[in-house]
Image: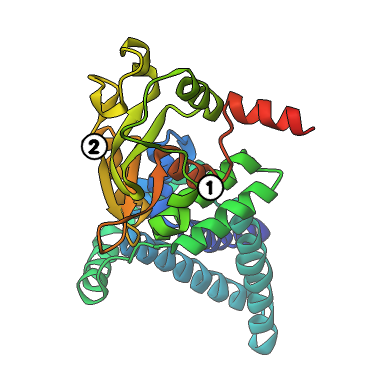
Amino acid sequence: MIYLISLFLILCSATFSGLTLAYFSLDLASLRRRANAGDPQAFAIYPIRSQGNLLLTTLLLGNVTVNTILSVFLGSLASGVLASLLATSLIFLFGEIGPQALFSRHALSFGSKLAPLTRALMFIAYPIAFPVAYTLDRLLGHATPAMYSKHEIMQIISEHEDSEHSPIDADEERIVHGALQFSHKQVREVMTPIDTVAMFDENQKLNNQFFEEVSKQGYSRFPIYSGNKTNVVGVLFAKDLLTEDENISIRQTEDAFDTNVMRLKGSAYLDTVLARMLKKKQHIAIVEKSSGEASGVISLEDIIEEIIQVEIEDEEDADDEEKLA
């Protein structure tokens, strides 16, 4: 009977100690996200863990009470130094170190399975634990949620991609990294310089040579300039050329030429530009200097490439690579 009582008290000590470390090793914000995503273990633990100081007070009160009873009980079996060494050894090895090492490795599993017991203990200890927990809440406030910088999130994603236990693959890692970084890039870093842009003069005639050049370039939109390339006056939509008369100039077209073109500064950030393009349903924008002269062109495709970290190749690009090969 004596040994059974001792074993029961050690198990109680181990449970209180292990649960304390298990519950408080789980980040509250992470638990909430998991619970909202449908994780049953997190769903069971979150209501308990969210009562931080009440939970802590209950578990510590139970742990101290059990360890005190165990020390007194062992003291009745032995005396002096022997009783002290015996109690310390049993509590240290089987009431603290062992359960904490075990529970910390399986915090979600143990925490969810023992959640009903924990709720019962919190109810029983409430008259004593609540005043202490309330005082701690008033003095210390609630726990501050863990926030991560973009660099830390990128490292977390990389660590998950490297782990065999994570479903995150290399493509998802690359895209998340690109999405977190593109807002820090400016338009001038991504734009195509104006001297390398395929574009036409507004007086260009819609003749066979022109259509051959449009087909050769393979773009759906072309900036249109007047006089020189730095004076962009609009955008030509290649798909609308089919309905236009032949041998008229670009500026004489009715549907294909649009003077309502988005204009940006090179210092603009890509996230702002993306939002503007989506709002105004624009796929291309002219980058201008402070003098108003065009310095480059940026497209929606350019921004998407920065996010997914891969160059988007159309059929024309693929054909060109095959020819070079």
Left or right position of 223 against 79: left
Q: Is residue 75 above or below residue 222?
A: below
Q: Point out which mark residue 108 bears.
A: 1
Q: Quadrant of residue 33?
A: top left
Estimate the spatial distance between the alpha carbons at disc 2 and disc 1, rounded to whole Å. 44 Å
Left or right position of 8 against 153: right
- The amino acid sitting under disc 2 is Lys
The local crowd at label 1, few if under 14, some if 14 to 19, many if 20 or more residues have their Cα within 10 Å, is many
Q: Is residue 93 above or below residue 311?
A: below
Q: Which residue is mark 2?
A: 279
* Image location of residue 74, percent across then percent down: 61, 73
Asked whether residue 86 appears in the rendered view, the answer is yes
Element carrying mark 1 = helix
Q: Which residue occupies 39% across, 59% down?
A: 186
Asked whether residue 116 appears in the rendered view, the answer is no
- The amino acid sitting under disc 1 is Leu
The residue mark sitting in front, 2 or 1, is: 2
The colour scheme applied to this rendered structure is rainbow
* Image location of residue 196, percent across then percent down: 50, 48
The local crowd at label 2, few if under 14, some if 14 to 19, many if 20 or more residues have their Cα within 10 Å, is few
Between residues 251 and 255, which one lies in front from this camera angle? Answer: 251
Q: Which residue occupies 46% across, 71% down?
A: 64
Chain-order first, disc 2 or disc 1: 1
Q: Quadrant of residue 4?
A: bottom right
Is mark 2 in CB contact (under 8 Å) with mark 1? no
